Image (cartoon, rainbow, N blue to C red):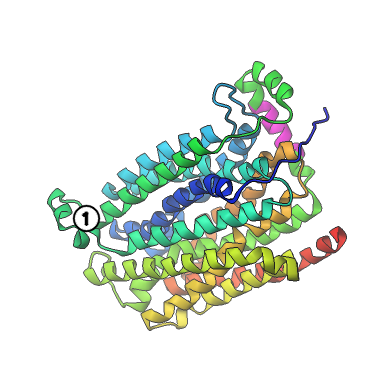
Amino acid sequence: METKTTERPNLTYWQIINMSIGFFGIQHGFEIQFARMSSIYEKLGAKPDEIPLLWLAAPATGLLLQPIIGYLSDKTWIPSLKARRRPYFFVGAVLGTAALFLMPDSSSLWMAAGLLWVLDASLNITMEPFRAFVADKQNTQQRPTGYAFQSLMIGLGTILGNYIASINLIEFFPSLAASGKTAMHYSFYLCAIIFFFSVLYTVLTTPEYPPNNLEELQAQKNKGLWAALKQWAVETKSCYFQMPPIMKRLAVIQFFTWMGLFCMWMYYSVAVPHDVFGATDPNSELYETGVRFAAHTTMIRGISTPIFALCIPLIAKQFGRAHTHAFALLVCGLGLLSIPFIHEPGMLYLPMIAAGIGWASIVSMPYVILVEHLPPNQYGIFMGIFNMFIVIPEILVSVGLGPLIMKLVNNSRASGVAFGGALIVIAALLTLSLRKFEAKQT
C-alpha cells in the first residue's frame, strides 16, 4: 500500500524547545545512574571485573524494548488524546521515577541490579519514540535543528544531573539530615522529580500529527495485539534485510562508538576515586569525594555538549556531516585515552570537555544522516533496528569483553576508560567512509 507523505510546516523555536524539554528530563535519569551505579555496586561489594555484568540491564533492555517500542509507536494513534508517541513518554516517565526513588535504598547487589533493569526499561520506553517524534513533527529542512535542540537539552540535562550528583544537598539544607537519608538519596529523588515533570511538560504542550496511513493502522488495530506483534516480527525482519547501504555503514560506526562509551560509563565514576584520589575503601569519605568530583567533571562535559551542538549545523554545512562527526569522535576518543596519565584532579576537566564534543555529535549526527534515507512511516521501526547497534556492543562488553578488559589492564579502572577511547578513535576513522554518500547527494 502506498502512503502519502506530507511536508510539515516550519515550527517556531519555542515549539522545538517544548518538544525537546522531555529529553532534558530523560537525561537526568541517565546521568544519575552513570554518576552513581558503579559506586553503589562497589559499596555493596562488587569487584571491578563484576561491574560489567551488573550493567547488563542497560543494553539488554534496549535490545529487547527499542525495536518493539519503535514499532508500536509507529502503529499507535489514540484519537481521543490525539497522541501517537506521547503515551510512551508518559508511561516510561512514571515507571522510571519510581525506580529512581527506590534505587538509593538498595540493600544488595541483586536489588540494585534489578532496579537498574526497571529504570533502563523505563528510559527506553520514554526515549525511543522521541527520535521518531522529531521526524514526525519537523520537515526535512528543520530536522537537523530539531536533533541539535535535543543535543542541547541532553547537554543541559547532563550539566544539572551531574551537578546534583556532585554536591552534598544536606550541606545546603541541613534539615534534610533529620530524615536519616544520605546525600545520595536526595540526589536520586531530585533527579526523579525533574525527569517526571520535564517529560510531562512535553506531553502536555506538544500536539502530534495523525499518521499518514491512518486507515491502515485502524485495520491493523482491529486485528488485535498478537497480530500486531506478529506483524512487527515480519516487518522488523524485512526492514533489517532492506537497510539502506548508509545505514549499514553507520551501524558499524555505532558499534565501536557505543562500545567505547559503555567503557567510560562503567568505569569513569569509580576510576576517579581509585586512580586519581587514591581511595581504597568504597565506604570512605575520600571515595565519596572522588565520586562527587567525577560527577562534577562530567558536568563540564555537559557544558561543552550544548556549545558544540549549536555549532554542528554550521560546521556540517561547511565541511560535511561525515567530517563533522569524525572530528567529534576523534576528539572524544583522544580525550578518554588520556585518562590513565592524569594524576591531578583538575586536569580531568579536559578529557570531559572532549567527551562532551563527541557526545553532541553522537546523539544527533548519525540520526540526521540516517533519517533522510528512511521511509517516513517506518521511522520508528528503523530507529529501533538502528539502536540495536548501540546495545549489542554494550551487551558484548557486559558479558565478556568487560571482564576480559579488566584482566588485561590489571583491574585499572582508568585503563578501562582509555580502552573505550581507543574504540571511539576507530569509529572516527570509519566515519570517513560516509563521505561518498554525501557526494551522491550533492
- Quarter occupied by residue 15: top right
Residue 303, image x and y in percent? 47, 67
Q: Secondary structure at mark 1?
A: loop
Q: Nearer the viewer, residue 91 or 412?
A: 91
Image: 313 above or below 20: below
Quarter occupied by the C terminus: bottom right
Image: 369 above or below 380: below
Residue sitting at 61 percent across and 42 percent down? Answer: 133
Q: Nearer the viewer, residue 13 or 375?
A: 13
The answer to whether residue 341 is visible is yes
Residue sitting at 67 percent across and 55 percent down? Answer: 144
Q: What residue sits right under mark 1 in the picture? A: 182
Q: Is residue 236 magenta?
A: yes
The answer to whether residue 410 is visible is no
- Quarter occupied by residue 382: top right
**Is residue 409 toward the left or the right of residue 4 in the image?**
left
Residue sitting at 49 percent across and 75 percent down? Answer: 351
Span shown in magenta: 229-238
**Is residue 189 toward the left or the right of residue 144 in the image?**
left
Residue 335, image x and y in percent? 53, 76
Q: Nearer the viewer, residue 135 or 106?
A: 135
Instruction: Check the image and name the residue furthest to the top.
Output: 222
Residue 255, image x and y in percent? 64, 59
